[in-house]
Image (cartoon, helix red, strand yellow):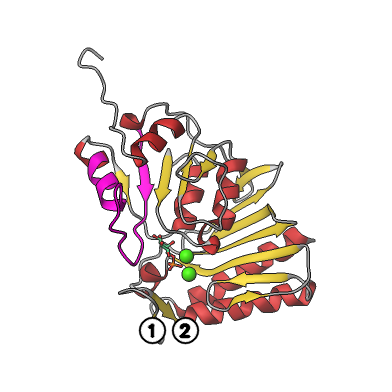
Amino acid sequence: MLKHTLLKAVQTGAAVMQSYFNGTFEITNKEGINNLVTEADHASEKAIFEVIRQDYPSHYILSEESGEIIQDSNYKWIIDPIDGTVNFANGIPLCCVSIGIEQDGKMILGAVYNPFINELFFAQKGFGATLNDKIIHVSKKTEVIKSALVTGFPYTYLDAPNGPLQIFEKLIRKGVPVRRLGSAAIDLCWVAAGRFDGFYEHKLQAWDSAAGFLMVEEAGGKVTDFTGNHYSPYQPHILATNGHIHQELLDIVNGGEVKTIPAHQ
Ligand code: IPD
Ligand code: CA
Ligand code: CA
């Protein structure tokens, strides 16, 4: 039943998002330059709330545009009504709806839907992850130098040692492909599907990663913070990999160098 409502919620939100795509809609700015929120984000969120409230009126909700709607419940829905809003606002069809559900503080279900390419990712704690109902697994690469990575940059630049641009430069200078898609939820799902070998970002919110981190774990990958501890979506740092390159990428994120391939190989 929870799964049914979850899938209905992501699909309903995504249909609303799609109905605004390439149309005219109001755009306003949040903290930072180009941190946008559109009429479509609010409309998607409203439609998602209606689906959830119909089946589970007493559940706790944490959603990007409305914040916390606190209720005394063991269940918490963590919602990003559009992840990839800048893409959306520019007519780039790399955006999705992302919803994770926690029970007693543990993520138990996650769904991410990008209607533009009809990709529905779903994960259930202990039961694996799927893309359009087919089981997905992380990749098998074992070295960062041979990996394809993805990252994101916060709206407000973090001027700190080992900041987003320093790590990006270090990897790019060694020839490691690092993509920047503009949707953390899609980044995570694409690690889960084995398209990327790893993803890192310095400043995410719970709604960006709630569903996606479960997707990576359930697809056989590993997700931690930047100290290597088990991931919590309530702190900013995320490192999500296929597991094999995790330690090497963790070292790089913390200031280490990329190991290159010896000349004879
Ligand atoms: C953003 C996207 C982006 C990431 C940002 C997020 P939004 O979410 O996930 O990829 O780099 O940190 O804030 O604003 O499109 O919902
Ligand atoms: Ca987001
Ligand atoms: Ca969003």
Residue at which label 2 appears: 39
Determine crowd level at label 2: few under 14, some 14-19, many 20+ residues with C-alpha closer than 10 A. Answer: some
What residue type is disc 2 on? Glu
Callout 1 touching callout 2 (CB < 8 Å): yes
Disc number placed over residue 44 in the picture, else none: none
Determine crowd level at label 1: few under 14, some 14-19, many 20+ residues with C-alpha closer than 10 A. Answer: few
Q: Quadrant of the image for the N terminus?
A: bottom right
Q: Quadrant of the image for the C terminus?
A: top left
Q: Which residue is rendered at x = 31% and y = 34% of the image?
A: 256
Count of numbered circles in the view? 2
Q: Could you say which is closer to the camera, residue 104 or residue 125?
A: 104
Q: Measured from the top left, where is residue 10 in percent x and y? A: 61, 66
Residue 208 in the image: above or below residue 16: above
Residue reaching furthest front?
161
Is residue 120 visible in the rendered structure shown here? no
Q: Which residue is rendered at x = 25% and y = 47% of the image?
A: 166
Q: Which residues are magenta?
A: 147-170
Residue at which label 1 appears: 27
What residue type is disc 1 on? Ile
Q: Which residue is rendered at x = 79% and y = 72% of the image?
A: 55
Q: Is residue 257 magenta?
A: no
Q: Is residue 167 magenta?
A: yes
178 horizontally vs 100: left or right: left
Residue 73 in the image: above or below residue 161: below
Answer with mark 1 or mark 2, whichever residue precedes in sequence.
1
Q: Measured from the top left, where is residue 2 in percent x and y? A: 76, 61
Q: Measured from the top left, where is residue 216 in percent x and y? A: 55, 44
Q: Could you say which is closer to the camera, residue 37 or residue 103?
A: 103
Residue reaching furthest top?
264
Residue 200 in the image: above or below residue 221: below
